[in-house]
Image: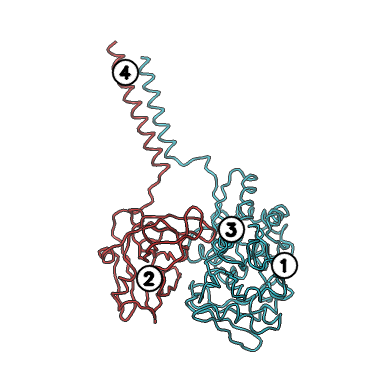
Amino acid sequence: MKARHVAALVIIAAVVMSVALYMPHEQEKTRLKVIYAGSLIVPFEEIEKQFESQHPGVDVQMEGHGSIQVIRQVTDIHKEGDVLAVADDSLILDMMYPDYSDWTVRFATNQMVIAYNNKSKYGDEINESNWYEILARPDVKFGFSNPMLDSCGYRTLMVTQLAELYYHNKTIFDDLIVYNFDPQISVTKNGNTYIVLVPEVFEPRAEKVVIRGGSVQLIALLDYGGVDYAFEYKSVAQQHGLMFLELPAQIDLSSPEYEDVYKKVIVRLGFQRFASVDTERVGMPIFYGITIPKNAPHPELAAEFVKFVLSKEGQRVLRDLKQPTIPPVTDNFDKIPDELRAVVIKDISRKEER
Amino acid sequence: MKGDSKARRLLSILVIVVVCVGIIGAVAYTHPFVGITEERINWNLTLIGEEEKVLPFDEIRAMPSYGGYGGFFTTVGMVNGPFKCKGVPIEELCTLVGGFNASNTLWVSAPDGYLMVFPYDQVRGNFVTYDPATLREVPHGDLKMILMYEQDGKLLSEDDGRPLRLAIVGSDKLLTEGHYWVKWVDKIEVRT
């Protein structure tokens, strides 16, 4: 009798164990998918931790890409995403409106700088008025990311072309860019606008200029002396403890005040890497944008997350980790989720502005 | 006494069954099956050069294959691989439509609208390679650009670019930049 009871208990245990293994876990956390631009990796890892600690039933799943790829995950590859955050808010308007989203909130900004370290040649000499001469010296190597692949890359071309206007020096772009590539990069002038034409094949002529896919590789190169200087976003340079030279606001793409100046440079890319995005990039101030796709699996929780990013607490996290913020503004106040109305303080009309 | 011994035997069997169910369940739960084994794949690759050819997946798989190791990292530094990769050398595919030389570029695209253009030296295997542990640039031996259909002995999964993905492989277990690894390749064009 006793053994039979034990046997019965074992059978029950086996059934319970099997059911427990194959049934969905009641305790399973809700997975909130956040797809973000690579330059936000450091602050968004901290945002993830803090949001999860305030929402114990949520597992925030972070996925980083270049900004265009962030949006393509939803629009072209048809993956599900709850929140998208990109380093160029105009991409949300261009690629997602009206089918996948109809609002954006600008929440952060950035500026182009020249990063270096204590091993960089002439690092003790470089300043706002001589940087282009130092970079052009024969024994100096510098790097930037491929404009076909990375927004920091085409923004580097904008900065160097804008520098010609700011410093009244017509050789800066030629000395730093044109002569160092084969096939050459050309610039044509149309009225007051300069159009930089990037060839299909973007290859440096010699070792003076180093091109890599993104910031990660350039920072590593700086670290072990592969280059002396690299064009980077200020936030990335600071997050990696690099020294950096700030450039004049007229050329560093940071200030809405100089929007009309920035617009004077257009970069036309050599091939259409993404069928859904055209090849022209117009100089504009750098604004990060965040949105929730219309087909987000967890729209309410996504709104909670965005609200946290835009809250004073979230903005402090961003700033503490060297990501400059701006007061959150939207282009479509009527369409943003109700929860966000308390943290988005201003309405702008992006369409008129553009 | 006899009844007790029968019950004990029954008990032992049940304990073994429970342990086996537990182990199988745990393994199935922690190692979900993601690869694709044998199945008919309906996919065509369009090759454009001096002439145009459409190759069904089965024909590509029947071509002489090349195997090697390769992996990549993403924009945010996430490392994938290195994997054991198997596929057809891109240069072999180009040979079918007139070949590839120094005046050409290679345009590789996919139905999701992604396109990459490769110059001659890259098609010949001239890439910067990285150590998977440190992401530092390291020298490499011969590299080959292949159209991969098998990764770690299995056909590619959808997320990995099923059924055809561009891969850069060699005998060293190194990484290249992820944007070269075009997924879901359905068109390769040799342009002058």
Instruction: Name the residue tied to disc 4.
Output: B7
Q: Quadrant of residue A90?
A: bottom right
Give the side of residue A178 with respect to residue B61, left or right: right
Chain B colour is: red
Q: Residue furthest top?
A: B1
**Label 1 SS:** strand
Q: Residue shown at 42%/61% (left/top)?
A: B140
Residue kind at label 1, given as amino acid type:
Asp
Q: Nearer the viewer, residue A187 or A50?
A: A187
Q: Are the two marked residues, 2 and 3, in contact with CB atoms closer than 8 angstroms?
A: no
Give me the disc on residue A83: 3
Q: Nearer the viewer, residue A252 or A70?
A: A252
Instruction: Name the residue tied to disc 1.
Output: A347
Q: Are the two marked residues, 2 and 1, in contact with CB atoms closer than 8 angstroms?
A: no
The answer, for residue A339, to whether it is visible in the render is: no
**Label 2 SS:** loop
Give the side of residue A78 with respect to residue A245, left or right: left
Instruction: Name the residue tied to disc 2.
Output: B124
Q: Residue shown at 55%/52% (left/top)?
A: A61
Q: Between marks 2 and 1, how big is the CA–CA gap?
A: 53 Å
Quarter of the picture containing the C terminus of chain A is bottom right
Give me the disc on residue A75: none
Count of numbered tags: 4
Q: Between marks 2 and 3, how big is the CA–CA gap?
A: 40 Å
Residue kind at label 2, given as amino acid type:
Arg
Q: Earlier in the sequence, mark 2 or mark 4?
A: 4
